[in-house]
């Protein structure tokens, strides 16, 4: 009996001692071992010049632009160059909207390099060219909008987009031949394609202007 009491007492004292040691320890974790000093923790992806141009080209763009004029010009830009102001294609067409040098001259731009490096000028060029094309095609817009050619309803925005692609002369031929004379560019894109793809946008912002200039 005495031995049992002694054993229990020893066991109790041992447990108490271990608890005392564990709770009274002043040992702390050395956080210096886990310092992030010297590590590169900036995971933000940097943008190169091309990426910045793509963002700039879509400034204010959202999926809710729908059939607005801004929606129209951004849709054309995306088809032409994916919205890249610095784009030059294999045929030498320049910028976000892929202008030819002769077209640029007609709207007052004689320095292609300056044009390519000036996003604001490119936006002005798109407006000026559309105004000029709308003046040239004013009678065709009046006579053909609302009619069906090659299975699609002709709209003003479709006409202006096709004129941007192929020039107003080619659009006149397409409309007046009721779709038989269907110009295709070097990549095989036709007047019909643009008439259909860019149908129904609001282009009332564009005013016909025979002498429209970007500069």
Image (cartoon, rainbow, N blue to C red):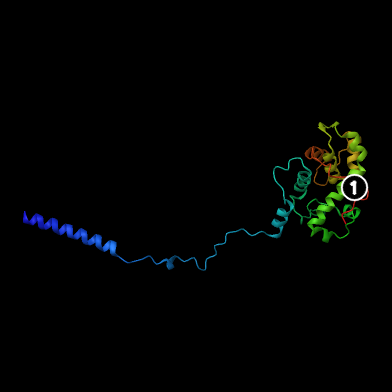
The residue depicted at 25 percent of the width and 62 percent of the height is: 20
The answer to whether any part of residue 177 appears in the image is no
Q: What is the secondary structure assignment of the residue under circle 1?
A: helix
Q: Is residue 101 left or right of residue 64?
A: right
Residue 56: % across, % down: 73, 54
Q: Nearer the viewer, residue 184 or 143?
A: 143
The residue depicted at 71 percent of the width and 60 percent of the height is: 49
- For label 1, the crowd category at 10 Å Cα-Cα, with few meaning under 14, some 14 to 19 and many 20 or more, is many
Q: Nearer the viewer, residue 163 or 73?
A: 73
In the rendered view, would you say 186 is above or below 52?
above
Q: Is residue 197 left or right of residue 43?
A: right
The answer to whether any part of residue 161 appears in the image is yes
- The quarter of the picture where the C terminus appears is bottom right
Residue 70: % across, % down: 77, 46
The image quarter in which residue 22 lies:
bottom left
- What residue would you read off at disc 1? 132
């Amino acid at each position: 009996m005495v031995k049992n009491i002694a054993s229990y007492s020893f066991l109790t004292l041992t447990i108490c001692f271990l608890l005392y040691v564990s709770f009274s320890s002043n040992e702390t974790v050395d956080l210096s071992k886990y310092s992030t000093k010297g590590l590169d923790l900036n995971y933000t992806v940097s943008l190169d010049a091309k990426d910045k141009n793509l963002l700039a080209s879509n400034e204010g763009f959202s999926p809710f632009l729908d059939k607005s004029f801004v929606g129209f010009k951004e849709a054309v830009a995306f088809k032409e160059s994916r919205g890249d102001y610095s784009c030059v294609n294999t045929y030498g067409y320049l910028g976000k909207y892929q202008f030819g040098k002769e077209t640029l001259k007609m709207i007052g731009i004689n320095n292609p390099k300056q044009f390519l490096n000036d996003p604001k000028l490119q936006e002005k060029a798109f407006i000026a060219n559309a105004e000029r094309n709308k003046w040239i095609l004013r009678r065709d817009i009046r006579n053909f909008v609302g009619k069906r050619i090659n299975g699609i309803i002709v709209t003003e925005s479709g006409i202006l987009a096709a004129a941007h692609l192929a020039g107003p002369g080619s659009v006149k031929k397409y409309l007046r031949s009721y779709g038989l004379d269907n110009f295709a560019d070097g990549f095989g894109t036709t007047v019909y394609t643009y008439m259909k793809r860019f149908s129904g946008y609001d282009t009332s912002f564009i005013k016909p202007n025979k002498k429209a200039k970007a500069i």
